Image: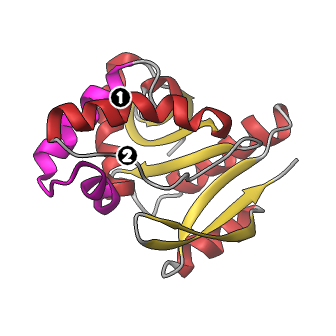
Amino acid sequence: MPIAIRKAQPKDYKAIAQCLMLAMEDIFYLFIGNNSNEKAIDFLEQLVQQKGNQYSYENCWVAISENEIVGAGLVYDGAKLHQLREPVAQEIKKVFGNDFNPEDETQAGEFYIDCVGVYPDQQGKGIGSAIFKFLIEEYVQKRKLTLGLLVEKNNPSAKNLYLKLGFEVINDVMLVGKPLEHMQFRP
């Protein structure tokens, strides 16, 4: 099954929100202070449709198979983390009454792969790997930029995939109480 990857468009918001939620479900619940999947998805759909925030369609790539979105990757300039996070914090405060001020998950000098999600019925078909390979080609090979990501310490299969793709462990970090490893792929 051939997979095409393209820049996301506003009309893709529902599929993007589903894919992003699959990738970050428990951490997103912590962000909003609510464990309702329906509320989380509705809220994420709103953010994806808007411009200028870290979850915006502007920062997404979508994987297409048989004319359907089957996965999505969210990537943005780490130097813009605070600028992109501020509208999210304001919306979380407005909608859920929660303060949103997690640790920095990225920094200047890298384009950050916030998350990659693939629909459950499409997992195991190489779509996630295809998205990562595309991002490496697009950002590292073509643009000569460094890619960064975080991986949970208790997820050795994900870490091994990233190592196999060429990422290296840079340091250990904490994000909302989760011990993670920061990895980068440099030109």
Q: Residue at x 48, y 82 (%)?
A: 154
Could you say which disc has been placed on residue 19 in the image? none
Q: Is residue 144 above or below residue 168?
A: above
Numbered range of the magenta stretch: 25-50
Q: Earlier in the sequence, mark 2 or mark 1?
A: 2
Q: Secondary structure at mark 2?
A: helix
* Label 1 SS: helix
**Pick the front one: 181 or 60:** 181
Would you place residue 13 above or below residue 122 in this image? above
How far, Cα to Cα, is label 2 from label 1?
10 Å
Look at mark 2 in the image and give the residue it sits on.
Answer: 20
Residue type (three-letter) at the residue carrying disc 1 = Val
Residue 44: x %, y % from top left = 27, 37
At x 61%, y 32%, the residue is 80
Taking the image as shown, residue 97 lies to the left or right of residue 74, namely left
Kindly identify the amino acid type of the residue bearing the numbered disc 2: Leu
Q: Is 69 positioned to the left or the right of 111 in the image?
A: left
Q: Is residue 38 magenta?
A: yes
User: Is residue 122 inside the magenta stretch?
Assistant: no
- Graded by Cα atoms within 10 Å as few (under 14), some (14 to 19) or many (20 or more), the crowding at tag 2 reads many
Q: What colouring style does the render use?
A: secondary structure
Do the numbered discs 2 and 1 sit on residues whose CB atoms are within 8 Å?
A: yes
Q: Is residue 60 shown left or right of residue 23?
A: right
> Which SS type dominates the magenta stretch?
helix
Q: Position of residue 91 (x, y in %)?
A: 27, 31
Number of residues whose C-alpha sits closer than 10 Å to that of mark 1, classed few (under 14), some (14–19) or many (20 or more): many
Q: Quadrant of residue 66?
A: top left
Residue 71, position in %: x, y? 43, 44
The quarter of the displayed image where residue 48 is located? top left
Residue 129 vs 84, above or below: the answer is: below
List the residue tagged with mark 1: 48
